[in-house]
Image: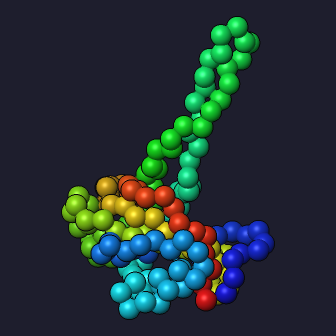
Amino acid sequence: MALITNIGAGIFTKLKYKADSTYTLPTNDSTHQAFITASSGDFDGATEVTGIREFPTFGKPANIVNVPQYGQGISSQISGQSDAPTLEFSLNYVPGTHNTLQGLVGDGNSYVFMLDVKNTTTGDNAAFYVKGQVASFEVTPSLTDSNQATLTLTTSTDYSGPFADA
């Protein structure tokens, strides 16, 4: 497979995670291939988060700082240090399916998360990796729709990717 080369809806996008046992996130396509196929880093054996309704935006956010300039009509802008973003996923809540995920909240462990953007069930993709923790899992009962939950992840590294699967 290759990176996605056309526009489309990412309706087959997935979120997977594995416990962080000192993984080094991939930095290029060859280290990505080694990462997903190595016995200690086989991401195909990772746990998939199911029932996701909505994915958040992700990546490196901008942090623009306005700097006043004495005697000028407008301030200038400079890039500052970006804050690590939190990721909030909306899920169709199924207690039996999401019980394990709920147990990860506040466990103090770090995980490697893979966001695999796909437009079709098979074919081109764009995999992104980030390390972080499961911060919260909040359930919202609904009388008119499916029960929902909000999964919040904190991130502790920059994003690595996009990479294509072999």
Residue 88, visible in the rendered structure: no
The image shows a total of numbered marks equal to 0
The part of the image, by quadrant, that contains residue 139 is bottom left
Q: Nearer the viewer, residue 119 or 86?
A: 86
Residue in view at x 48 percent, y 58 percent: 158
Residue 4 falls in image quadrant: bottom right
Q: Residue at x 47, y 90 (%)?
A: 37
Q: Indicate the position of residue 79 as horizontal and vertical percent values.
A: 60, 37
Residue 72 appears left or right of 164: right
The single residue placed furthest to the right in the displayed view is 6
Which is more toward the observer, 117 or 32? 32
* Quadrant placement of the C terminus: bottom right
Q: Position of residue 58 (x, y in %)?
A: 54, 57
Residue 39 can be seen, yes or no: yes
Q: Is residue 7 left or right of residue 123?
A: right
Picture quadrant where residue 109 is located:
bottom left
- Give the residue at x 70% y 8%: 71
- The residue sitting at 53% across, 80% down in the picture is 31
Q: Residue furthest top?
A: 71
Front-lying residue, 52 or 85: 85
- Point out residue 142 in the picture as x, y percentages from the top left corner: 39, 56
In this orientation, which residue lies closer to the viewer: 107 or 131? 131
Q: In the rendered view, would you say 117 is above or below 63?
A: below
In this rendering, would 112 be left or right of 27? Answer: left
Q: Quadrant of the N terminus?
A: bottom right
Whether residue 60 sits left or right of residue 95 in the image: it is right
Q: How is the image coloured?
A: rainbow
